[in-house]
Image (tube, rainbow, N blue to C red):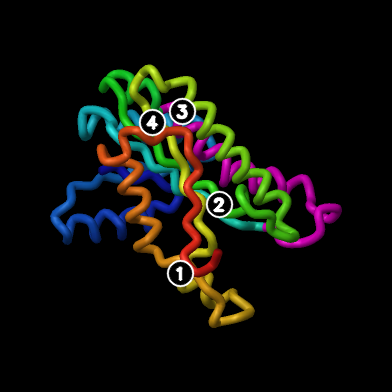
């Protein structure tokens, strides 16, 4: 497994955690909003593990909340960079390696915002909708090359930061294990007939 992220310290911690579980993992630190970092990550996967079978694009974030008319250009740029460009550049760098293996799977992270409108989240929703569009396009483009491309669209996931920021502490949240299990399913052979799909993960937050 190769992990790529802009946070080198956080990456090192994750590598240690995987190592403690007996999972071989390597790190590639870099700003994935830039194509050079994405290419470096896939090159590291090639060098360390001989190629790629599965790509999971988790990078993302929510940086703005407010009326559409008040969204600043720099805010839109950041939402697009972190939520969309990271997935775009990683897919672009990874596809040649997947083709060399005869196929594989890509799982992108969209958001419940692409299937259900959310107030005052126009920039975020637009960026995640771009991820959904990219997912469907790549699924069609590489269908005959045996590369499956899907996306998960979770509602708000239960994390320490999300719980702390919620106005209602009893608001329904999606459990992290449910997201992980869905990603594993889409990445595995059990979903070999599924591609081009945006899979909502809502739990009781539907």
**Dot 1 or dot 4, earlier in sequence:** 4
Q: Residue at x 60, y 42 (%)?
A: 81
**Dot 2 or dot 4, earlier in sequence:** 2
Tag 1 residue: 159
Q: Position of residue 45 (x, y in %)?
A: 28, 34
Q: Is there CB contact under 8 Å for labels 1 and 3?
A: no
Secondary structure beneath disc 4?
A: strand
The answer for how far apart the CA atoms under marks 1 and 2 are is: 16 Å
Q: Position of residue 87 (x, y in %)?
A: 50, 38
The answer for how far apart the CA atoms under marks 3 and 2 are is: 18 Å
Q: Residue at x 53, y 50 (%)?
A: 60
Q: Is there CB contact under 8 Å for labels 3 and 4?
A: yes
Tag 2 residue: 111
Quadrant that contains the N terminus? top left
Q: Which mark is residue 148?
A: 4
Secondary structure beneath disc 1?
A: loop
């Amino acid at each position: 497994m190769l992990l790529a992220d802009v946070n080198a310290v956080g990456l090192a911690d994750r590598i240690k955690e995987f190592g403690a579980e007996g999972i071989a993992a390597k790190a590639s630190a870099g700003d994935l909003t830039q194509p050079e970092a994405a290419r470096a990550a896939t090159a590291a996967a090639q060098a360390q593990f001989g190629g790629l079978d599965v790509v999971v694009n988790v990078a993302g974030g929510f940086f703005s909340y407010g009326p559409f008319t008040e969204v600043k250009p720099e805010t839109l740029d950041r939402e697009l960079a972190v939520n969309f460009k990271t997935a775009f550049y990683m897919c672009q760098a990874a596809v040649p390696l997947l083709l060399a293996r005869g196929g594989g799977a890509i799982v992108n992270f969209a958001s419940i915002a692409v299937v259900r409108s959310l107030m005052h989240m126009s920039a975020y929703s637009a960026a995640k909708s771009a991820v959904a569009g990219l997912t469907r396009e790549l699924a069609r483009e590489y269908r005959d090359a045996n590369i499956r491309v899907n996306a998960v669209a979770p509602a708000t996931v239960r994390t320490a930061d999300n719980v702390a920021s919620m106005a209602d502490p009893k608001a329904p949240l999606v459990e992290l294990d449910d997201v992980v299990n869905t990603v594993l399913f889409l990445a595995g052979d059990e979903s070999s007939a599924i591609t081009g799909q945006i899979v909502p993960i809502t739990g009781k937050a539907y």
